[in-house]
Image (tube, rainbow, N blue to C red):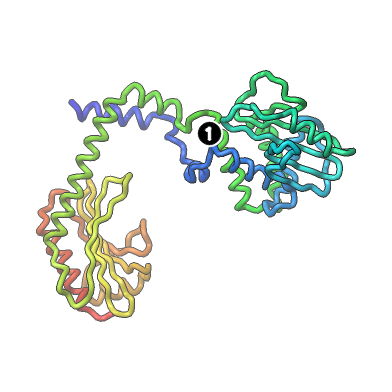
Amino acid sequence: MKTDQFHQLLDAFKSLSSPIKDPTFMEIAGYPHYENVCSNILAFYFQPDAPHGLSDLCLKALMSLASDYEPQSNVTVEREVVTKAGNRIDILIQSDTHLIAIENKIYHSAVNPFHDYAAFLQQQRSHRKLTMFLLSLYPVEDQNLHGFIPIRYADFFSKLRPLMGDYLVGANTKFLISLTDFIETIENLMRGSVMDESMFNLFNERGSEIVALLEEVNKFKAELRKKVSELGSLIDYQNKPVEIKQWYYRKERALLDVLVHDIYLPNSFVVAIDCVLTVEGWKIAGYDRKGDLESARTLFNNLQIPLKQNSNSGDRLEHITTYPYKEPLTTIQAVTQEWIDKIAATQVP
């Protein structure tokens, strides 16, 4: 009965339109909501002659939210500009014709001394056009912002995205990818979650069944580790002419477990023998740790060990025979032991 429920659960999972989205690089780094980090990134992209190669893309998108964009010359971008009262303006952009201030808000409330900012900027503007923005993740509550224009990141990105195609020629690919990652990170913050709604509903409606399935998965993974550990205890890898290290490996998101033997031959030639156990059964693979396929092929051919090249991994050779999941461990042990003994006693090709 439980198996039938799991089949239904997996069918429901496969029917969903999209899985959980991959994290952005900023999310991996743990900085998606740090205002200083976001302000540093914005300042870099607002500087037209920075090495991103995107010229005035971001500046044009920003200014189009306040008025028609006018090309600017001699642009400089500063961070944390201090007013006479000791308050700090997040980003200040200056050119021959414009003075642009940006107060950046991710999660914090907009309780900044906007009156001081505005007074300081009026003193600095001279003949230049002054534009002040309050850039925030969410709409700002009604209050006296002393001339600061409230805009959301969504507004900014709605102007930015349509312009990006015009700036691709000459753009630095690395920084273009970084800008896209930044946009996606902020949009994830705006949504509050990177999880697809249909996936969330599945977790909500069938959470207990999912937990039960995960428990069975963990039991199976424990069984895999138990079997490869038992195999490892049957292998004699010590007291050989060369150094041999035995260790275990498994992928967190895969139903497999591996017993590994690294055989250290002369001239820094290291041969790895993997005994891989999955639900499909056992497979024995051998390869050179440095990825030298031809050297590994020569070695195995000289030892008359029948191998074939793995089409999914170009530097690995696999034993021609695979074994069922329930194959006695003594069978796997006999083949693996023969390989280890032959390789440990050989000369490097």
Q: Position of residue 173 (x, y in %)?
A: 62, 52
Q: Quadrant of residue 184?
A: top right
Horizontal side, residue 309 vs residue 27: left or right: left
**Rendered residue at 83%/34% (across/down):** 122
**Rendered residue at 69%/20% (across/down):** 143
Tell me the quarter of the image containing the N terminus.
top left
Amino acid type at circle 1 is Asn
Q: Which residue is mark 1?
A: 188
Against 243, is 95 above or below? above
Q: Position of residue 49 (x, y in %)?
A: 74, 52
Query: Residue 89: in sight, yes or no?
Result: no
Q: Quadrant of residue 92?
A: top right
**Rendered residue at 81%/33% (across/down):** 68
Horizontal side, residue 119 vs residue 344: left or right: right
Against 260, is 211 above or below? above
Against 45, is 21 above or below? above
